[in-house]
């Protein structure tokens, strides 16, 4: 009987320790979950700020490019940065918007060439950037 009482006491003590350990693990998991949620939120905020900066960069570079003050590759880079930030955030129609902006860059390059404020290289780079994006989209659809 004494032996059963000791065994029962030891079992109860082990159960109590296990319960405390499980509670500590649950608290730690909850804390990690909260930390993870906070990290995800912070990452989301960071990408939203990056996208806002990419929009400003694109607008500024396009104004300079349209005025003939920058080569096409700078406007193309700004467009690409905006696409990347939009894709990370899951912005709907990010690729369509990219193509629309790339078409605009191409038409401005052609107009700048006519006005003699741009070069043949600008036109070629703008056409190439837009066609590369279209080809990539076509190949991705064909793979699906």
Image (cartoon, grey):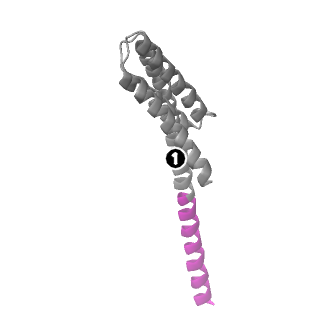
Q: Reply above or below: 95 against 15.
A: above
**In the image, residue 72 lies in the stretch drawn in magenta:** no
Q: Residue at x 57, y 26 (%)?
A: 100
Location of residue 75 in the rendering, given as x and y in whole percent from the top left corner: 42, 23
- Foreground: 94 or 99? 99
**In the image, residue 10 lies in the stretch drawn in magenta:** yes
Q: Reply above or below: 62 against 79.
A: above
Write down the region rendered in magenta: 1-25
Q: Reply above or below: 14 against 130.
A: below
Q: Reply above or below: 24 against 11.
A: above
Residue 11 placement: quadrant: bottom right
Q: Is residue 101 left or right of residue 81?
A: right
Residue 43 visible in the shown view:
no
Q: Residue at x 48, y 38 (%)?
A: 132
Location of residue 127 in the rendering, given as x and y in whole percent from the top left corner: 47, 29
Mark 1 Cα within 10 Å, few/some/many (few <14, many 20+)?
Answer: few
Q: Is residue 33 left or right of residue 76?
A: right
- Foreground: 133 or 35? 133
Quadrant including the C terminus: bottom right
Q: Residue at x 61, y 81 (%)?
A: 8
Q: Is disc 1 placed on a helix, strand or loop?
A: helix
Quadrant including the N terminus: bottom right
Q: Main secondary structure of the magenta part?
A: helix
- Foreground: 66 or 17? 66
Residue 123 visible in the shown view:
yes
Say which residue label 1 marks.
36
Location of residue 106 in the rendering, given as x and y in whole percent from the top left corner: 49, 23
Numbered marks: total? 1
């Amino acid at each position: 009987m004494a032996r059963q009482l000791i065994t029962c006491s030891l079992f109860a003590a082990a159960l109590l320790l296990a319960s405390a350990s499980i509670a500590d693990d649950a608290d730690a998991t909850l804390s990690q979950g909260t930390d993870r949620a906070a990290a995800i939120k912070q990452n989301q905020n960071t990408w939203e700020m990056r996208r806002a900066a990419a929009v400003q960069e694109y607008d500024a570079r396009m104004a300079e490019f349209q005025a003939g003050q920058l080569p096409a590759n700078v406007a193309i880079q700004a467009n690409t940065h905006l696409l990347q930030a939009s894709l990370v955030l899951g912005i709907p129609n990010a690729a369509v918007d990219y193509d629309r902006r790339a078409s605009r860059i191409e038409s401005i390059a052609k107009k700048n060439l006519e006005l003699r404020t741009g070069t043949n290289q600008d036109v070629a780079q703008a056409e190439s950037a837009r066609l590369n994006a279209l080809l990539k989209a076509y190949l991705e659809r064909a793979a699906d």
